[in-house]
């Protein structure tokens, strides 16, 4: 029995050696499909982490974000109507379910920042927000330094680093790291109006305290005490009392996570919106669903084209080898062995291309990992994960399945060819 199997394998490999180059060329699309799959799966978790942490922020399981219900078409950070009243803020602070409550305020005056590097200086309109230092207690080792002092400490979102590096890349300037930016100085310019309607510019020196992945809104963050102190000092600039700032968000930690559902419902009955860890996860998963859909669509198109190419190529192979196939049938080779020979040949070719596709995808992943900051400065913070375990086996298996299935119908067609018509040619 063993000798019979060995002889059959020798027979298959001898047959395969005559057509391997044609078969490899006809199935070449599998190489691109597998490489693309390896590259995407290797980057998927990195992209998910990047979207979640840099764009949507992160929350612990016992933390929630509270903000006013946003009217359709209104941005909570741009619309003056979408703010929290002081009475609501005090009600939230007084809730016994919370262990910690921190408020996010926004200066209502026109605010700008003046920054300069490498001899280039710019003044840009940027919203200025204030937050309690305690919010960064477990998030930033230097949170105690985030106090109202001169120069005013400033925190920017981590995505701001990518925007800065995009700007420096356009200017032909070197890329900056987070460590290089910390301690960078500039100015915060706040404009108030005097009783005569004349604009008064107040320029306050600032220093970059740190970058934070927890900040998912556009603007810079300063200590809340700076905001309240500045607005108190200038509340009468226009000749009558002006508050000068608004409450935009509240960040709260519940004492017991079991009370989170009831607490959320209680806040919603107060006309507020609540975001929790699950809401952030839903946003991230929704973004990944879109990316996965695009990958699946592109992969499906590439896979379909590959299958059609292999199918057509094997039809041509069947036509060119019809005489040999008919001779085998005459000497007693069964239809099953004819089919098995074609499928085995396709599986062998698929295995080769699967291995090559895997290593090609791994190389592309490594290349992208080392060059991504150079090619796309905005994605400098994207940390690429290594290739997923067992991906080689998955790649080879998928390649074998695609190649074998694509060759199956031509193989069945070959096994059913009319012997006498073929031999009579």
Image (cartoon, rainbow, N blue to C red):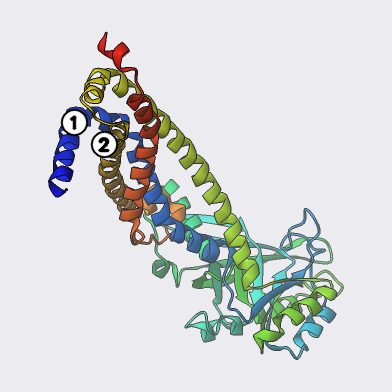
Residue 68, x across and y down, in percent: 78, 69
* Front residue of 160 and 138: 138
265 left or right, relative to 17: right
Q: Is residue 119 visible?
A: no
Q: Residues within 10 Å of mark 2 (few under 14, many from 20)?
A: many
The picture places residue 267, in percent across and down from the top left corner, at 79, 77
Residue found at the very far top of the displayed protein:
425
Residue on which disc 1 sits: 15
Which residue, given by chain and number where applicable, does mark 2 sit on?
A: 345
Distance of label 2 from label 1 (alpha carbons):
9 Å
Q: Is residue 290 above or below residue 229?
A: above
At numbered mark 1, what does the secondary structure look like: helix, strand or loop? helix
Q: From the viewer's perspective, is residue 159 above or below residue 422?
A: below
Q: Observer-nearest residue: 165 or 71?
A: 71
Q: Quadrant of the C terminus?
A: top left
Residue 140 coordinates in the image, percent (x, y): 50, 80
The answer to the question of whether label 2 and label 1 lie on touching residues, with beta carbons closer than 8 A, is: yes
Q: With 219 as the anchor, is 408 left or right in this view?
A: left
Residue sitting nearer the eye, 410 or 28: 410
Q: Is residue 259 visible?
A: yes
């Amino acid at each position: 029995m063993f000798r019979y199997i060995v002889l059959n394998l020798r027979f298959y490999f001898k047959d395969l050696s005559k057509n391997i180059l044609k078969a490899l060329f006809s199935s070449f699309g599998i190489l691109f499909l597998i490489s693309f799959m390896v590259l995407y799966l290797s980057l998927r978790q990195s992209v998910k982490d990047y979207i979640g942490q840099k764009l949507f922020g992160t929350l612990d399981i016992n933390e929630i974000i509270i903000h006013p219900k946003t009217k359709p078409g209104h941005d909570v950070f741009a619309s003056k109507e979408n703010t929290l009243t002081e009475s609501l803020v005090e009600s939230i602070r007084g809730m016994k379910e919370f262990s910690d409550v921190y408020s996010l305020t926004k200066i209502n005056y026109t605010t700008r920042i003046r920054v300069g590097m490498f001899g280039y200086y710019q003044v840009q309109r940027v919203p200025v927000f204030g937050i309690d230092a305690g919010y960064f207690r477990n998030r930033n080792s230097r949170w105690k330094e985030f106090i109202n002092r001169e120069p005013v400490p400033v925190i920017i979102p981590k995505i701001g680093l990518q925007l800065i590096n995009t700007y420096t890349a356009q200017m032909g300037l070197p890329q900056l790291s987070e460590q290089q930016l910390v301690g960078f100085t500039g100015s915060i310019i706040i404009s108030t109006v005097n009783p005569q309607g004349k604009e008064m510019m107040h320029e306050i020196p600032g220093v970059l305290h740190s970058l934070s992945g927890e900040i998912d809104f556009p603007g810079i963050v300063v200590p809340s005490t700076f905001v309240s102190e500045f607005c108190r000092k200038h509340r009468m600039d226009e000749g009558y009392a002006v508050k000068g700032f608004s409450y935009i968000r509240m960040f709260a930690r519940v004492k017991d996570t079991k009370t989170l559902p009831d607490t959320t419902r209680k806040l919603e009955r107060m006309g507020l919106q609540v975001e929790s860890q699950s809401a952030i996860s839903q946003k991230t998963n929704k973004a990944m669903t879109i990316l996965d859909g695009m990958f699946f669509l592109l992969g499906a198109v590439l896979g379909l084209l590959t299958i059609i190419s292999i199918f057509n190529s094997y039809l041509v192979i069947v036509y060119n080898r019809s005489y040999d196939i008919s001779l085998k049938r005459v000497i007693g080779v069964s239809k099953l062995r004819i089919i098995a020979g074609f499928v085995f040949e396709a599986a062998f070719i698929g295995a080769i291309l699967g291995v090559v596709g895997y290593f090609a995808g791994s190389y592309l992943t490594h290349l992208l990992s080392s060059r991504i900051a150079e090619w796309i400065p905005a994605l400098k913070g994207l940390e690429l994960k290594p290739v997923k375990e067992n991906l080689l086996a998955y790649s080879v298996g998928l390649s074998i399945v695609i190649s074998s299935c694509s060759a199956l119908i031509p193989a069945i067609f070959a096994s059913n060819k009319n012997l006498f018509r073929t031999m009579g040619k």
